[in-house]
Image: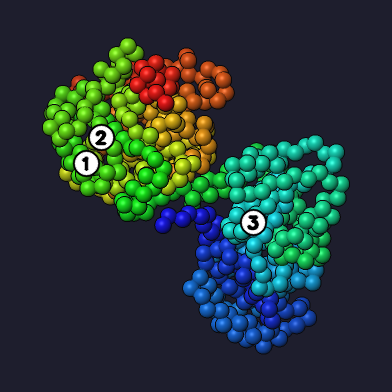
Amino acid sequence: MMHRHLGKRINTALVPIGTGDIGDTALNLAQALADEVILVGVVPVGEEETMSAGAQAARQVRKRLFSFSSPSIRFKSTVIVSETPWKDLNSVIDQEKPDLVFIEWKEGQLVCGFPILEVLSNPLCDVAIVRGSSPFRLDRTLITVRGGPHAELAFQIGMGMQPKQIDVLHLALKGVVDDAPFKGLKEILRQIPEVNLRSVITQDVARSILDESRKYDLVILGVTASRNMGVSSIGAVAEKLLRESPSTIMVVKTRRPIAESMFNETIGVKAISILVDKWFAENTFHADEFLDLKRLMEFKEKQGSSISLAMPSLNEEKTVHKVITTIKKALMDNVPLLDEMVLIDSDSTDRTRKIAEELGIPVYIHQQVLPELGARPGKGEALWKSLLVTKGDIIAWIDTDIVNIHPRFVYGIVGPLLLNRDIQFVKGFYRRPLKTGGMLQAGGGGRVTELTARPLLNLFYPELSGVIQPLSGEYAGRREALENAIFFSGYGVETGLLIDIFEKYGLRSIAQVDLLERIHHNQELEALGKMSFAIIQTVLHKLEERYERSIIEDINKSIKLIRRTKNGYYLDVEEVAEHHRPLMISVPAYRERHKR
């Protein structure tokens, strides 16, 4: 029903095709990796020959191109006939801008007359040099690494091939202790359990890899990197494998230039991207995957879980009735997916609480819950205290201001938790049309997300850079994770929870679900400024915990708001200080109420 796997890692690959079978192996590998393959016919002619000497070969190549029939393959109608075929192919690469070009190696050299030093010097895209017979198997793949940008590309391609077994072999020379280039990649590999990681210390790297290669269908490694920008050679190890190994060999080079000053700083950057891409492919769901509520009930019963829905509210009398009735009818009356629904109110002054009570929903005012700990303003405070007043093993939260409420807002975020016990926390995401003055602007909204939250996560927590809407108000989690998580009381609650779950349980414990579209009442720009201010404080607080040092103790926690009247501008000062609550599991009243 909901099988998930890592998708292809390359959008477009380009393969030069020559006479005979030149290009067959490269094409098969390209098709295993890329969504689209571009074929380019190439006929080299010698300096002593006229261009017309290549006409017959060009006809043969065109015939080959016409014979390839697949929706994922397209070819250039013009065959390159040239004394400088690599220079002419570069013009096509510049025009098509593929992610990767596959070039075959036969009989000790590149096909089509491509000079290897030119191919590897400042390429316009990533390059893969391949040698092997076609067809071939991809059951067992070995990636050999020592670190650096080319090793990361090798790993990216190896994962994209989706072999049945993937081993990563790290080789270090005996007596060499400087292993810095591998450290960034090693930390990422530890978070990917599908990969079997081995480290070997050897006196002869080439011989060790050659011996290992005999056990695999495909061996992938990077070229020899240089600290001089744009310079590299294929390397003695790669050449030995290309000449002697019985396996299919792929040697890769990234187009990314590595300057001397940046050589160590860039290590691990692409590896994190691989990790995030893999997580995104495997842990990004769509609400429609969970449309079958009876199937969800089977998952729930098999897991033995109970589910609570807590709805934070503050003066939402216009929307709360529809939110409650829609969810209650679909997910309690028709199918008992939810075991309870509660309203956790922040002392509304309108009819919000009365409406919920009339509909039979238990109502709690968060300022009156746990009075011995005092009352703080903010949505985060309401969410934290909802842990006390709910009973479920899984707790879901949705806002009560959703204009286009639909049951998917709930079953979508609990679905991954019922499907996979390893998932601890699920975030919803959606398109957010911006409603202003009665007009609906498609694609608007999410301003704080894009201008504050996501840039901060990309900067300090790049593993979370794949989370589409870290600030969404629709999310769910397992009680055991949430009661051991830190809740900030104000606008920083979503950011703080996301970081905390990641730090305690790892990236694979988080999932996200496409909830299609969410229409709600957007806030004024001033409120968004305060929200951003709180989120920045939250991230700094989390960094304090990571580095065990004070960062914001002496930083100003009041925000100067710019006001305008008919008499001019003035400054208004408002405190926006993000404080967090203790772990709920540490609160005596909670432990007494939720005895295990």
- The three-letter code of the residue at mark 2 reads Met
- The three-letter code of the residue at mark 1 reads Lys
Q: Nearer the viewer, mark 2 or mark 3?
A: 2
Residue 256 shows in the view: no
Disc 2 is placed on an element classified as strand
Local packing at callout 2 (Cα closer than 10 Å; few below 14, some 14-19, many 20+) is: many
Within the image, what quadrant is residue 410 found in? top left
Local packing at callout 1 (Cα closer than 10 Å; few below 14, some 14-19, many 20+) is: many
- Figure check: 534 above or below 292: above
Residue denoted by label 2: 341
- The three-letter code of the residue at mark 3 reads Gln
Residue 191 shows in the view: yes
Disc 1 is placed on an element classified as helix
Q: Earlier in the sequence, mark 2 or mark 1?
A: 1
Tell me how the rendering is colored.
rainbow
Q: Residue at x 52, y 22 (%)?
A: 544
Left or right of 320 on screen, residue 23: right
Left or right of 391 on screen, residue 197: right
From the top left corner, tell me how far across and down residue 369 is, in percent: 28, 19
Residue at the far top: name it.
372
Pick the quarter of the image with the C terminus.
top left
From the top left corner, tell me how far across and down residue 516 is, in percent: 32, 50
Residue denoted by label 1: 328
Q: Residue at x 15, y 30 (%)?
A: 357
Label 3, label 1: how many angstroms apart (C-alpha)? 46 Å
The answer to whether marks 2 and 1 mark residues whose Cβ atoms lie closer than 8 Å is yes
- Figure check: 354 above or below 228: above
- Which residue is more in the foreground, 399 or 568? 399
Q: Residue at x 37, y 44 (%)?
A: 300
Q: Name the disc covering residue 165, or none.
A: 3
